[in-house]
Image: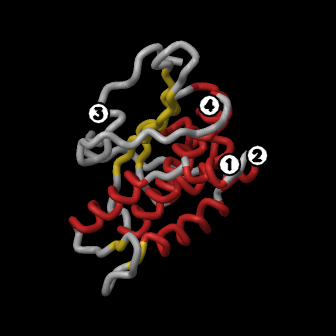
Amino acid sequence: MRTTAPGPEVLADHTGKPRPALNMPLTYEQARLGMAFHEAGHAVLSMAYGMHIITSEVIAWEPQPGQWGVTGNTKHQTQNTPPWHYAAQCAAGELAHVTYLMDYGLWTPQRAAACAADHDRELAIDVLAQFGYRLGHGSVPEGGKSWGMVQGMARRKVGHLWREIRTVAHAMDKRTVLAGDEIAALTGLVNPPLQGGAA
């Protein structure tokens, strides 16, 4: 565990605003593994949908003695990814996190609420809007989909790839950072080549 918090850019959403800090009433080890599941959800679905994974990691720090914070980061390159697949991988982190709580006997309403990843939803909405696709938060926009519909797509894929997500999460918890090729080796998925050297 780091002794200092990561830089503000790591704790910010895609617009540069700080993401909210949510209280997760778990032990450090349980919360760290939960965040590893969150990032593994993003990484595995991204790779399954043909995106190149650069790295996926869990980040933990001790802001004050006896306290801790955890977050994560998955770096990928989209490669002609269908927009709704991109949105589904955004939804996969929170869904994998909640599924972890359920599978490990840790689920409570308060803990499930603390898995909220509104920044992932807002990122999906904004990215899809750049390409003319309408993703609604609480309703189905004309010609588009609702976030609930995207979560349904992601939930099916997370269930189908749960073994791979679980394998990656436990490896990430032990090693902190996994490269995309390591995730491919662990799961049998293909990590497409990085195109043009840009993330």
Q: Residue furthest right?
A: 105
Residue 22 location (% of width, % of height): 49, 41
- Give the structural element (helix, strand or loop) at label 3: loop
Tell me if residue 50 comes above or below residue 25 in the rendering: below
Label 3 near label 1: C-beta < 8 Å? no
Residue 140 location (% of width, % of height): 38, 81
* Picture residue at 43% right of the left edge, 49% below the top: 192
Q: Earlier in the sequence, mark 1 or mark 3?
A: 3
Cα separation, mark 3 vs mark 2, equals: 32 Å
The amino acid sitting under disc 1 is Tyr
Tell me if residue 19 comes above or below residue 5 in the rendering: below
Marker disc for residue 104? 2
The amino acid sitting under disc 3 is Glu
Cα separation, mark 4 vs mark 1, equals: 13 Å
Label 1 near label 2: C-beta < 8 Å? yes
Between disc 4 and disc 2, the foreground one is 2
Q: Earlier in the sequence, mark 3 or mark 2?
A: 3
Marker disc for residue 100? 1
Q: Earlier in the sequence, mark 4 or mark 1?
A: 1
* Picture residue at 55% right of the left edge, 27% below the top: 176
The amino acid sitting under disc 2 is Tyr
Residue 15 location (% of width, % of height): 24, 48
The amino acid sitting under disc 4 is Asp
Q: Residue furthest bottom?
A: 142
Residue 195 location (% of width, % of height): 30, 47
- Total numbered badges shown on the rendered structure: 4
Label 2 crowd (10 A; few <14 / some 14-19 / many >=20): few
Cα separation, mark 2 vs mark 1, equals: 6 Å
Between disc 4 and disc 1, the foreground one is 1
* Quadrant holding the N terminus: top right
